[in-house]
Image (spheres, helix red, strand yellow):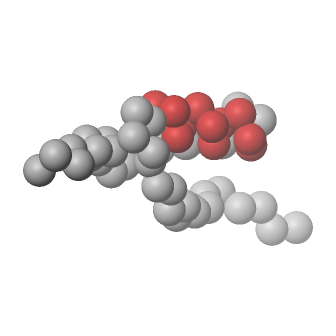
Amino acid sequence: MLYLKKATAIINHRLMPGGSLVDVKTFIENTIEDDAINVTVTGSEASKVSSING
């Protein structure tokens, strides 16, 4: 029988203003619900919303 030692997934998330990378990581971990899976999040925080006044 073959057992996987490592698997990798790349998931693209868009952050809403006020959201953070910690929020994304927490969402993924809560969705997976498996402590044996290590979630690593990379990227940059959401940029600020531009003013409509220029």
Residue 32 seen in the figure: yes
Q: In this view, which residue lies farthest toward the left?
A: 54
Where is residue 52? Give x, y as percent: 23, 48
Q: Residue at x 74, y 43 (%)?
A: 32
Residue 41 seen in the figure: no
Q: In this view, which residue lies farthest toward the right?
A: 1
Q: Residue at x 21, y 44 (%)?
A: 51
- The number of numbered badges drawn on the structure is 0
Residue 5, picture quadrant:
bottom right
Q: Residue at x 88, y 67 (%)?
A: 1
Q: Is residue 12 left or right of residue 18?
A: right
Q: Residue at x 16, y 46 (%)?
A: 53
Residue closer to the observer: 5 or 19 = 19
Where is residue 15? Give x, y as percent: 44, 48
Q: In this view, which residue lies farthest toward the front?
A: 53
Residue 11, picture quadrant:
bottom right
Q: Is residue 36 left or right of residue 42?
A: right
Residue closer to the observer: 19 or 38 = 19
Q: Is residue 42 above or below residue 21?
A: below
Residue 33, picture quadrant:
top right
Q: Is residue 43 left or right of residue 32?
A: left
Where is residue 3? Give x, y as percent: 77, 61
Q: Is residue 37 above or below residue 9?
A: above
